[in-house]
Amino acid sequence: MTSDPKQHSRVITDGPDRAGARAMLKGIGFTDDDLARPIIGVANTWIETMPCNYHLRRLAVKVKEGIRAAGGTPMEFNTIAISDGVTMGTEGMKASLVSREVIADSIELVGRGHMFDAIIALVGCDKTIPGAAMALIRLDVPGLILYGGSIAPGRFRGKDVTVGDVYEAIGAYAAGRMSDADLKELENVACPGAGACGGQFTANTMAMTLEFLGLSPMGTASVPATDPRKDEVAQHCGQLIMDLLRQGVTPRDILTRQAFENAIAGVASSGGSTNAVLHLLALAREVGIPLTIDDFDVISRRTPLLADLKPGGRYVAVDLDRAGGVPLLVQRLVTAGLVDGKQLTPSGRTLGEEASKALETPGQEVVRLLSNPIKPNGGLVILKGNLTPEGCVVKIAGHERLYHRGPARVFDREEDAMRAVTHSEIESGDVVVIRYEGPRGGPGMREMLGVTGA
């Protein structure tokens, strides 16, 4: 129990010398009663440039209702976001990884400047999730993260599709296997509404990871963006942030070395994005916990691949929710002793206690039994060699062949490689190497989903 839930904001709102600040806040509708309560920052990454974050304005309303009902006063503010999916394949995507740092810096700056007593962040697309988490760690006031949720799958000729299928279709179109009309039909249905990309790409991977870490409440991430339950989740998170404030629990109380190992196991068991390596290393650095790229290899080797999720598997995030959600996967791993169930979550209960409440849908095939994994080892592998003496990340979920030898086709930028692919200049067995596109060399590490899909 913290001695004063308003210990930070009191400096802004209390006393005769703060009359000017109160006058300005009253000018936008806050009352004396509002200002006497703890002030909760609501960091929103809403933006009108992508479906991933487009619905976060509506969710913020529900979050603020929950905060007020639990005795706090919410103050919402915005930060920026860059869509990987929209900027993919252009110079614009060089801004994506940089945006993670700007998001973290801006949330931290507003939090420090306005001396919020606690912060809840609403996130959607890829870099908003780790960016918000980095900021909460730096501020170290009670805080949690609410993920906006996955987009529903589109339907194309009787099959579920995601934006990843569109990128593959671009390659099929270039090879003459799809017509203009086919590609347009797929383009029109692949993204049917708000929410982040539907496969186990970076957004869904990092949202799941934050549940394993304990920065997001268990069971909140897998509820889809447009599901009516998301409003209830948002309101509950608003109430939960007040519980964390009264208990004085901050992110640094939750983020242990074991919590990070749990998160890595979650990525490995779900066939998650290789970007999780990049982001978890950054989060660990913020906390001051030693974590290296080699730790991912050790943990992935001992963790079975259990979740049959796209892009390597058959199902999308909405299917995971219907099967039992993230809690079901956590429950499997806790039962096997592959994650530490004693780690804390925002509810005040342990990871194991939260996972014990998971409800598995009878007959579901999304999350395999421990006795019948998709693969005995996780989806991430760290390799070292003459090209990568410090290590590289390879995602093997959905792939059977673990050895390949072939001629290197070397390009100095993504556009050159994409041109070769779409002009049928890449032959079966070629190894495509694209140089100067890393975090430093790019700068910004453009993702090659367009090229790999095509």
Image (spheres, grey):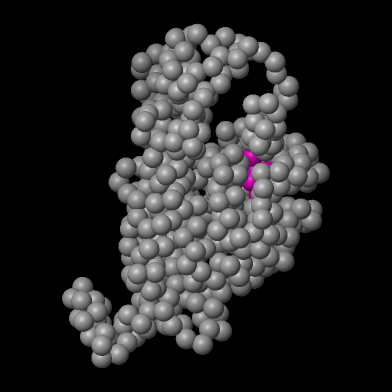
Residue 385 x %, y %: 70, 28
**In this picture, is 314 found above or below 180?**
below
Magenta stretch secondary structure, dominant: helix
Q: Which residues are magenta?
A: 266-271
* Quarter of the image where one finds residue 35: bottom left
Of residues 109 and 30, the one nearer the viewer is: 109
Total residue callouts = 0
Residue beneath the point at 35% across and 51% down? 80
Residue 168 drawn above or below residue 234: above
- Residue that protrudes farthest toward the bottom in the picture: 16
Which sits in the foreground, 81 or 414?
Answer: 414
Check residue 340 for magenta coloring: no
Q: Is residue 310 visible?
A: yes
Q: Residue at 42%, 21% (x, y): give it.
A: 415
The image quarter in which residue 38 lies = bottom left
- Using the image as rendered, state which of residue 205 and residue 287 is in the foreground: 287
User: Is 99 displayed left or right of 448 in the figure?
Assistant: left
| Residue 302 x/y as whole percent | 78, 45
Picture quadrant where residue 36 is located:
bottom left
Along the viewing direction, whichever of 299 and 282 lies nearer the viewer: 282
